[in-house]
Image (cartoon, helix red, strand yellow):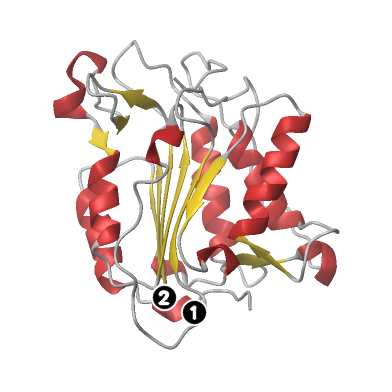
Amino acid sequence: MARLPDPVRSRAVLIGAATYADPELHDLPSVRNNVADLAAILTSGHGTGLPTEHCTVLEAEFESLGDKVEQAAAAAEDLLLVYYAGHGLVDSRSRLQLALPSTRVASLLWTALPFDTIRETLSCAKARNRVVILDCCYSGRAIGHMSGPALGGQLDVDGTYTLTATARNQPALAPPGAAHTAFTGELIKLLAQGDPEGDDLVTLGHVYHRLRQVMRSRGLPEPERCGTRTADLLALAPNAAKSGATKDFRTPVRLGPRRVGRRQQ
């Protein structure tokens, strides 16, 4: 049976890389809104219900990124969620690299965050549900990499789940002037407003199928997902369209000084 995570035993880390020193990587101002609004949903009583201190947002200072993810992995017992929005890059060995503000395209191996680092950290975590959401170009390369041994216990809903904005060879989109990137904007809308055709809870499985339908209808890159065991039954919010608790978590558009490209890279 679908359920929400136990908020006391869950942790989330939201990583939003919005600005970049390398001129080859254009800034993505809407990423700031992505992480701010997702954090609002995850910590709202109308959403996931996590205590504020259990949801870490990283969108300015990234020196402690590794420590924050490892601390969350060590503390989470039910849900461990890691979200990233920014530029996704591919190295010479076709591996997904997540760009940070200090990333240099000419030196990816030394300056970017390998997705494999996140994968290994989450694979070793004790949380029953380990979820990765990637909103970046080529994010589909993460599909199939999140697995690990089955975990014992009494809860019915457990496993790993990877949700990506695109396929392995597709760009993600950040429409100029929009409050959010294309993928995360639809994710936030679904979690905040619900789906009249859905069940009482907005599960990960429902998120994937609904976003795939919406993105296809708009001619946008379609998300991909990979899950193990029953992780697709884990919910991130009650269905506001059913409960009448629809909320608007959107924040005002905050545009940075540099250009905003349609492709996240």
Q: Quadrant of residue 103?
A: top left
- Residue 124 horizontal/vertical position (percent): 23, 63
Q: Is residue 250 visible?
A: no
Q: Earlier in the sequence, mark 1 or mark 2?
A: 1
Per the rendering, the mark at residue 6 is 1
Q: Residue at x 67, y 40 (%)?
A: 212
Judge from the rendering whether residue 183 lies leftward or rightward of residue 114; answer left or right. Answer: right
Q: In what element is the residue under mark 1?
A: loop
- Residue 94 horizontal/vertical position (percent): 29, 24
Q: In what element is the residue under mark 2?
A: loop
Per the rendering, the mark at residue 260 is none
Q: Quadrant of residue 34?
A: top right
**Type of amino acid under label 1:** Asp
- Residue 260 horizontal/vertical position (percent): 53, 17
Disc tally is: 2
User: Crowdedness of circle 2 by 10 Å Cα count: few (<14), some, many (20+)?
Assistant: many
Judge from the rendering whether residue 82 lies leftward or rightward of residue 202; answer left or right. Answer: left
Does residue 90 lie above or below 231 as drawn?
A: above
Dots 1, 2 in contact, CB < 8 A: yes
Does residue 70 lie above or below 99 as drawn?
A: below
Q: Is residue 197 visible?
A: yes
Q: Residue at x 24, y 56 (%)?
A: 121
According to the image, label 2 marks what residue? Answer: 78
Q: Residue at x 63, y 78 (%)?
A: 1
Q: Residue at x 21, y 23 (%)?
A: 108
- Residue 70 horizontal/vertical position (percent): 23, 60
